[in-house]
């Protein structure tokens, strides 16, 4: 299987990236080459986007030279909105999302693609009445699946919207970070079993 990089950094041991950006321009500067590399290697990309930005997202891909209609036709590129993925049924259920991710990966492999790359716009976590502990549990649990399958997943966060405590918790659920266009191993990363135990304890005392 071919190797892959993000922001010029090879991903070899860890595959779950918490990516913090200050603007859409910064985000696409980093992610467009990531998508193009995948398509050039025959891999599939799955894009989970804000429904308000769906057409703008496709336009940015096209402007970079990515043949969106052709890749969507062949199934090599798939764009889904939050309500088709994270918020299917209008609320976030982490077990459903984990199952959907497993299904998407298996379907990609069955279709002949060597790898599935997933990038998710996480702005939906700031919608009203979101269970942030449930989101953190999902972020912790998905690591095991990504490691076993060597599948990259990039969770995109708008750094301006995060409180200090939210940012620290997110850092602890991702083994890799992307800040200012640089990918690094995350010294704050906490293994899933330990993080889930802590989250359960928080829930018991809340």
Image (cartoon, rainbow, N blue to C red):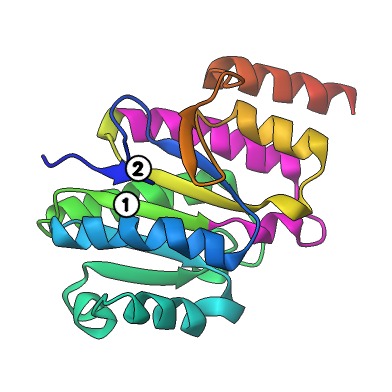
Identify the element where label 1 is drawn: strand
Residue holding disc 1:
117
The percent position of residue 132, horizontal first and vertical second, equals 74, 43
- Residue depicted at x 34% and y 46%: 102
Residue contact between numbered discs 1 and 2, judged by CB atoms under 8 Å: yes
Which numbered disc flags the more N-terminal residue, 1 or 2?
1
Rendering quarter of residue 6: top left
132 falls in the magenta region: yes
Is 186 placed above or below 43 here?
Answer: above
Residue at x 54% of width, y 22% of height: 192
The majority secondary structure of the magenta stretch comes to helix
**Residue 152: numbered disc:** 2
Pick the front one: 94 or 146: 146
* Quadrant assignment, res 111: bottom left
The image shows residue 192, relative to residue 102, as above or below, that is above
Left or right: 96 in relation to 3? right
Residue range highlighted in magenta: 121-147
Query: Which quadrant does the N terminus fall into?
Result: top left
């Amino acid at each position: 299987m071919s190797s892959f990089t993000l922001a010029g950094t090879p991903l070899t041991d860890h595959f779950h990236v918490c990516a913090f950006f200050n603007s859409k321009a910064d985000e696409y500067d980093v992610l467009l080459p990531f998508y193009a590399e995948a398509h050039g290697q025959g891999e599939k990309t799955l894009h989970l986007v804000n429904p308000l930005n769906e057409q703008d997202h496709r336009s940015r891909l096209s402007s970079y030279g990515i043949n969106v209609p052709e890749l969507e036709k062949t199934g090599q590129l798939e764009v889904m909105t939050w309500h088709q993925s994270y918020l299917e049924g209008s609320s976030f259920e982490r077990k459903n999302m984990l199952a959907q991710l497993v299904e998407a990966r298996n379907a990609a492999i069955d279709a002949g693609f060597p790898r599935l790359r997933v990038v998710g716009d996480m702005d939906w976590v700031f919608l009203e009445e979101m269970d942030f502990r449930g989101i953190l549990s999902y972020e912790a649990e998905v690591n095991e699946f990504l490691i076993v399958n060597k599948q990259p997943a990039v969770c995109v966060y708008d750094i301006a919207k995060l409180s200090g405590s939210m940012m620290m918790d997110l850092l602890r659920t991702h083994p890799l970070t992307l800040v200012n266009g640089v990918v690094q191993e995350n010294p704050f990363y906490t293994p899933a079993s330990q993080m889930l135990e802590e989250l359960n304890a928080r829930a018991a005392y809340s």
